[in-house]
Image (cartoon, rainbow, N blue to C red):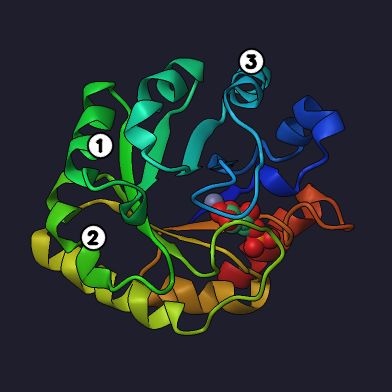
């Protein structure tokens, strides 16, 4: 299982330091919000390029923005290693994932908890990662939606049927209590914000997740 701490929950005054403290993780998850696709604004290109300069971690960029195809090249140039777009954010999701691959980056697709899984099915052969949102995107620190486990199971089956090696990532409300369940359902990457960058500190947060998964 790969762990992807979400920088949304870190102390932005210590971005470089926070990245060092999560160096044992597989990815740094970067949540970009535009105040339109989701009812919150987080950060964008300058913060990604600062994170890129501060760390060699894989930058797993989750674009919660309308018409993400407008900015894929900019995020790639700012240091993204993987770019994930929402099916709800563009009528051209197939074109968007194609463009991500043309840019030489890992192409991901995602969907909100209320969106039928069928919406991502046509692009499954063309992606390197599928992200299941287990909260409504826009804010960290929300409660995990339990129905997400079944969605992970279904996507695991569809990917296996295709013979796809795509990562199956889950994002939102991940804790040591539900991590095992998601691993058993077939997830390969867990995003965690508040359970990593909580008061206990990211080293302990990561260790608790690893213990729960061991
Ligand atoms: C939600 C973001 C998540 C969020 C996860 O819109 O996509 O990545 O930061 O935070 P927690 O783990 O606190 O739910
Ligand atoms: Zn995210």
Mark 2 lies on a secondary structure that is: loop
The residues tagged by marks 1 and 2 sit, at their Cα atoms, a distance apart of 13 Å
Q: Which residue does the numbered mark 3 point to in the structure image?
A: 53
Tell me if residue 148 comes above or below residue 191 in the rendering: below
Q: Using the image, determine if residue 78 lies above or below residue 124.
A: above
Which label sits on residue 96?
1
* Mark 2, other Cα within 10 Å: few <14 / some 14–19 / many ≥20: some
Sequence-wise first label, 2 or 3: 3
Mark in the foreground, 1 or 3: 1
Percent x, y of residue 169: 42, 57
Q: Label 2 CB, ligand 2: below 8 Å? A: no
Residue 107 picture quarter:
top left
Please determine whether, in this image, residue 10 is positioned above or below residue 20.
Answer: below
Q: Residue at x 78, y 52 (%)?
A: 197
Q: Nearer the viewer, mark 2 or mark 3?
A: 2
Mark 2, residue position: 120
Q: Nearer the viewer, residue 9 or 27?
A: 9
């Amino acid at each position: 299982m790969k762990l992807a701490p979400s920088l949304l929950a870190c102390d932005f005054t210590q971005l470089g330091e926070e990245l060092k403290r999560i160096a044992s993780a597989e990815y740094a998850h970067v949540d970009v919000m535009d105040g339109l696709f989701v009812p919150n604004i987080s950060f964008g290109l300058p913060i990604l390029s600062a994170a890129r300069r501060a760390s060699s971690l894989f930058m797993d960029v989750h674009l919660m923005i309308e018409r993400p195809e407008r900015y894929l090249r900019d995020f790639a140039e700012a240091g993204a290693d993987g770019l994930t777009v929402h099916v709800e954010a563009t009528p051209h999701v197939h074109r968007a994932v194609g463009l991500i691959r043309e840019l030489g980056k890992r192409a991901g697709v995602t969907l909100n908890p209320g969106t039928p899984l069928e919406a991502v099915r046509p692009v499954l052969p063309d992606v390197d990662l599928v992200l299941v949102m287990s909260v409504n995107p826009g804010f960290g620190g929300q409660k995990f939606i339990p129905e997400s486990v079944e969605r992970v199971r279904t996507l695991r089956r569809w990917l296996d049927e295709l013979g796809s090696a795509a990562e199956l990532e889950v994002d939102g409300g991940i804790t040591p209590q539900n991590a095992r369940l998601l691993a058993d359902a077939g997830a390969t990457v867990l995003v965690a914000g508040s359970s990593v960058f909580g008061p206990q500190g990211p080293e302990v947060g990561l260790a608790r997740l690893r213990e729960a998964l061991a």
